[in-house]
Image (cartoon, rainbow, N blue to C red):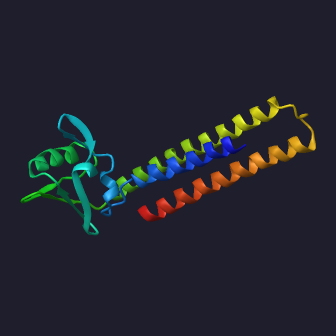
């Protein structure tokens, strides 16, 4: 049973992580978590070569550890398809204005959130189906009290994680609107 609960919990954690990557029109260092930079022939995370701070509600500042990497970091942020346009601040910093969201863009993001949430619900229901299949394979009789109790426990776990999913989605939608 713990295995299936862990699968459900992982689905909700992935949902929260995915929702955290969605840009809300406010400056947040997590916006740049997916940015990779070429450094010494390797692709490394931006946070490995720079420090990201919030200057104000609509501006991030990237302080690059090596002055020679400023142009590489600037290109990486531009190429990340985040809709961000970094501006160089001598000697080793970048200012990244975070544009406000247009209504159409907000609606598109809300649709994407719905798709992400549905994928999470599908993973939770899949874990429930796997748990039920495993329960049927046990030596318990299908209509025994213990079997029914376990079925009920599985459904309660499913309901709990679906509610967690819905709560996370609702919070993100409120944040965007």
For the image shown, how many numbered marks are present on the structure? 0
Drawn side of residue 148 relative to residue 65, left or right: right
**Residue 12 x, y percent position in the rendering:** 56, 50
> In this picture, is 26 found above or below 74?
below
**Whether residue 98 can be seen here:** no
Residue 172: image x %, image y %? 47, 60
**Toward which corner of the image does residue 43 lie, by quadrant?**
top left
Quadrant assignment, res 97: bottom left
Query: x and y percent of residue 83 in the render?
Result: 25, 50
Q: Quadrant of the N terminus?
A: top right
At 37% from the left and 59% from the top, the residue drawn is 24
Outermost residue, left direction? 90
In the image, residue 80 above or below residue 86: above
Residue 53 vs residue 39, the one in the foreground: 39
Q: Is residue 12 visible?
A: yes
On screen, residue 24 versus residue 116, left or right, reads left
16 or 70: nearer the eye? 70
Outermost residue to the top: 137
Image height check: is 103 above or below 150? below
Against 83, residue 39 (above or below) is above
Residue at 26% over, 49% down: 48
Residue beneath the point at 50% across and 45% down? 116
Residue at 22% x, 50% y is: 49
Q: Is residue 108 left or right of residue 11?
A: left
On-image quarter of the C terminus: bottom left
């Amino acid at each position: 049973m713990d295995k299936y609960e862990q699968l459900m919990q992982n689905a909700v954690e992935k949902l929260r992580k995915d929702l955290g990557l969605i840009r809300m029109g406010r400056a947040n260092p997590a916006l740049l978590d997916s940015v990779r930079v070429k450094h010494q022939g390797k692709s490394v995370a931006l946070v490995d070569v720079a420090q990201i701070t919030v200057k104000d509600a609509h501006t991030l500042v990237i302080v690059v550890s090596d002055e020679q990497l400023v142009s590489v970091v600037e290109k990486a942020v531009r190429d990340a398809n985040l809709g961000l346009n970094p501006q160089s601040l001598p000697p080793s910093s970048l200012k990244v204005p975070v544009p406000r969201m247009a209504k159409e863009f907000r609606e598109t993001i809300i649709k994407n959130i719905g798709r992400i949430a549905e994928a999470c619900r599908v993973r939770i229901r899949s874990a429930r189906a796997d748990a039920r299949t495993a329960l049927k394979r046990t030596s318990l009789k299908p209509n025994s009290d213990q079997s029914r109790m376990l079925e009920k426990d599985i459904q309660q776990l499913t309901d709990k994680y679906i509610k967690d999913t819905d709560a996370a989605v609702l919070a993100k939608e409120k944040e965007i609107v």
